[in-house]
Image (cartoon, rainbow, N blue to C red):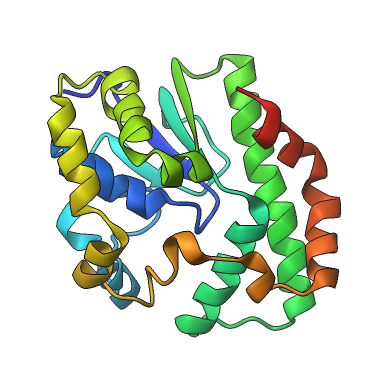
């Protein structure tokens, strides 16, 4: 049983939330919900979410800035350049309308910044009973270790390390693509934000997120 009554999986879009949901489910059998969506559409099917979704689960995905429904949070943070580039690619792949690219880049940089700040301040203020941050880049490098910290150390599941190792194997990029689609899980380790973003866009994002990015890099 999970240690907390209701735990947020909080992230900015395209920061590893869906992958973490699959990892947790494969490790301990805990399904998860999305706070604003029943997750039955084609995009959700392309992410293989229906097999891990339960609207009554105490583990809840959210992109919102709201701690009130939760007593704990797993805050997943991804480098903003890669997150925004991935989100831009996602919109193109799934035909999400973007009126003006320059407006999109600025809006999402502000959105990433506000999201990171909100959940960081939730940690610093102690408003939540429990808080655990996962840096997406750390999750890529040491998936076993980061997943163990989430399910065993933070959520409190009594679990064998072998189950974590098997969950990581079962949720490899190739297997996630096979379960869902290459459109939803396109690049993994090989993503380079400079393939999507221009130098001007990179500079614009960097100017907006510089303070929160410093926290992401330096805070432990």
Q: In front: 160, or 48? A: 160
Residue at 55%, 75% in the rendered image: 89
Residue 152 visible? The answer is: yes
Quarter of the figure with residue 143 = top left
Residue at 43%, 51% in the rendered image: 16
Locate residue 71, reporting x and y percent: 41, 22
Side (left or right) of 91 relative to 99: left
Residue at 29%, 73% in the rendered image: 46
Quarter of the figure with residue 87 = bottom right
Total labels drawn: 0
Locate residue 37, reporting x and y percent: 35, 59
In the picture, the quarter occupied by the C terminus is top right
Side (left or right) of 163 relative to 32: left
Q: In front: 154, or 171? A: 171
In the picture, the quarter occupied by the N terminus is top left
Q: In front: 20, or 174? A: 174
Locate residue 93, reporting x and y percent: 47, 82
Is 102 above or below relative to 145? below
Is 139 above or below relative to 5? below
Residue 56 visible? The answer is: no
Q: In front: 181, or 35? A: 181
Locate residue 101, reporting x and y percent: 73, 79
Residue at 71%, 71% in the rendered image: 104
């Amino acid at each position: 049983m999970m240690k907390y009554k209701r735990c947020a999986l909080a992230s900015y879009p395209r920061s590893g939330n869906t992958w973490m949901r699959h990892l947790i489910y494969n490790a301990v059998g805990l399904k998860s919900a999305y706070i604003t969506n029943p997750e039955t559409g084609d995009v959700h099917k392309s992410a293989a979410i229906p097999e891990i979704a339960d609207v009554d689960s105490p583990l809840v995905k959210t992109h919102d800035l709201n701690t009130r429904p939760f007593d704990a949070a797993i805050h997943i943070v991804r480098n903003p350049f890669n997150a925004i580039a991935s989100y831009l690619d996602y919109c193109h792949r799934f035909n999400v309308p973007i009126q003006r690219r320059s407006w999109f880049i600025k809006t999402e940089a502000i959105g990433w910044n506000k999201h990171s700040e909100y959940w960081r301040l939730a940690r610093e203020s102690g408003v939540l009973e429990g808080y655990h941050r996962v840096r997406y880049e750390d999750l890529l490098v040491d998936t076993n270790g980061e997943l163990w910290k989430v399910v065993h150390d933070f959520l409190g599941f009594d679990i064998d390390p072998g189950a974590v190792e098997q969950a990581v194997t079962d949720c490899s990029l190739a297997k996630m693509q096979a379960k869902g689609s290459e459109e939803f899980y396109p690049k993994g380790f090989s993503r380079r934000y400079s393939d999507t973003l221009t130098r001007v866009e990179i500079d614009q994002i960097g100017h907006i997120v510089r303070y929160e990015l410093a926290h992401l890099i330096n805070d432990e």
